[in-house]
Amino acid sequence: MRYVAAYLLAVLAGNQSPDSASLEKILNSVGVKVEQANLTKVIDELKGKSIEDLIKEGTSKLATVPSAPAGAPASAASGAPSAKKEEPKKEEKKEESEDEDMGFGLFD
């Protein structure tokens, strides 16, 4: 992903066909260690293609991807309010008596 981001930055800066040196410069400026094999693969895959067309194509592909979690129940996925209402629990405070000495005192 970082190589694609660097490629996009280079294209936005006006370089319509970035080479590995320009992408390495971008990646090194932010402290990313460049793996030459990955960099070469990204450049080869994107060479000669219009970035605008690739973004349009990718956007249409993303539109077909379901966005709800796979294991979510239907009511939770649809955002429907739950039928079960939780009432706040009332804490019962037990009255503590100061005179609870069990019939004897410490100094009696």
Image (cartoon, helix red, strand yellow):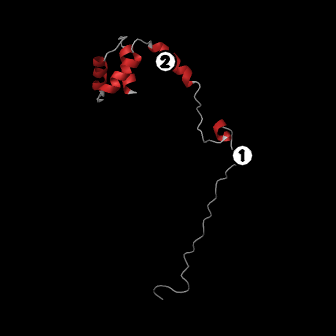
Q: Which mark is residue 27?
A: none
**Residue 8 x/y as whole percent:** 40, 18
Q: Secondary structure at mark 1?
A: loop
Type of the residue with mark 1: Ala
How many angstroms separate mark 1 from mark 2 (CA)? 42 Å
> Vertically, is 13 above or below 73?
above
Residue at image mark 2 = 55
Q: Earlier in the sequence, mark 1 or mark 2?
A: 2
> Vertically, is 94 above or below 8?
below
> Vertically, is 79 above or below 60?
below
Could you classify mark 1 by the number of other residues whose Cα lies within 10 Å: few (under 14), some (14-19), or many (20 or more)?
few
Looking at the image, which residue is at 44% across and 14% down? 51
The quadrant of the picture occupied by the N terminus is top left
Q: Residue furthest bottom?
A: 108
Looking at the image, which residue is at 52% across and 87% down? 104
Image depth: mark 1 or mark 2 in front: 2
Type of the residue with mark 2: Ile
**Residue 102 x/y as whole percent:** 55, 83
**Residue 54 x/y as whole percent:** 48, 16
Residue 80: image quadrant is top right
> Does 57 sit left or right of 10 as displayed?
right
Q: Do tag 1 and tag 2 residues touch (Cβ < 8 Å)?
A: no
Q: Residue furthest right?
A: 83
Residue 99: image quadrant is bottom right
Residue at image mark 1 = 83
Looking at the image, which residue is at 69% across and 49% down? 85
